[in-house]
Amino acid sequence: MPELPEVETTVRGLASVLDGRRIMRIETRREGLRRPFPADLVQRMQGARVTGLSRRAKYGLVHSDRGGVMIFHLGMSGRWRIDPETIDKHDHLLIETDEGHLLALNDARRFGSVDVADEAGLAQHPLFAGLGPEPLAGPWGQGITAAHLAAAFKGRSAPAKALLLDQRTVAGLGNIYVCEALHMAGIAPARAGAKVAKARFEPLAAAIHQVLEAAIEAGGSTLRDYARPDGELGYFAKDWRVYGRAGADCPACGGVVERLVQSGRSSFWCRGCQK
DNA sequence: CACGATACCTGTAAGC
DNA sequence: TGCTTACAGGTATCGT
């Protein structure tokens, strides 16, 4: 489910009840998700005070006053539920705060993950070491530029879609926002990286910035949803121009949006706008 | 090494 | 109504 904007919105929603609070109790309700929960998760985080929350790529980070950081990934179906009325069978990890709030990490498909790391040297952590630059400016960098993208695409035979989905190129993009950004920038998803025209990198960088900022904005406007137990993510689905719209009209040129499958994943695009 | 295919797991919607 | 199939926001790993 969640790409960068949804993780960003999730982190902000969690911060409203977690930041500055002491974690009174952590309960794991199964062995783990994609991987087992860390053996020292409870020992390191239970009793600690949360000093802040942040995000790197699609990972959410919960910082503590004891030098430990809990790192969560929502995979495809993960979400945090705040003060759920009842515990669902997919609520796999529970956190109780000193104010009595209950946070439940819910993940039906269990493609998500939870890790614990030391605050010191976080950037060198195996989860983060191989990641590309953050698309937007923030604590982890200044944000991607056209030059970054041009360098990453240079000499590559892989399609633009695959290159942007690769977290080593840009950290945090997922299927939806790659489709949207490629459409905005006028680049066909199947075009080989090396064959993308030089003049397209500036529009591509701008499109990535714009679509992510707009999505975060949309998430922010529905942030109150996070205080509800449904844990809705607040995608700005109503604003998708091509994603999930196969057969519908292209909002830019009036052509028809098409779907194609690239490395097992759906790409949506308009051959009138994207070359 | 770069690239594409596949596996992981459950839920939902569509088709028969 | 029930059964089957396709597909879903991600990442790690395995061939070629």
Image (cartoon, coloured by chain):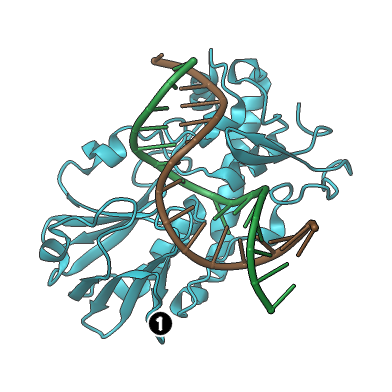
Chain colours: A cyan, B brown, C green
Return the chain for callout 1.
Answer: A
Figure quadrant of residue A99: bottom left
> Which image quarter holds the C terminus of chain A?
top right
Work out whether A173 lies above or below A40: above
- Residue A19 location, x and y as percent? 28, 70
In the image: residue A193, left or right of residue A127? right
Residue ID for mark 1: A84
Q: Residue shown at 38%/54% (left/top)?
A: A112
Residue drawn at 47 percent across, 35 percent down: A170
Judging depth in this view, the residue of A261 and A85 nearest the camera is A261
Image coordinates of residue A215 in percent, x first then y, are: 58, 56
Within-10-Å neighbours for mark 1: few <14, some 14–19, many 20+:
some
- Relative to the observer, which residue lies in front, A122 or A111? A111
| Above or below B16: residue A88 | below
Q: Amino acid at mark 1?
A: Pro
Report helix, strand or loop for mark 1.
loop
Q: Position of residue A194 (x, y in %)?
A: 60, 15
Residue visible at 31% across and 80% down?
A102
Q: Residue furthest right?
A: A254
Would residue A90 be found to the left or right of residue A184 on screen?
A: left
A59 to the left or right of A126: right
Q: Is residue A157 visible?
A: yes
Q: Residue at x 56, y 71 (%)?
A: A222
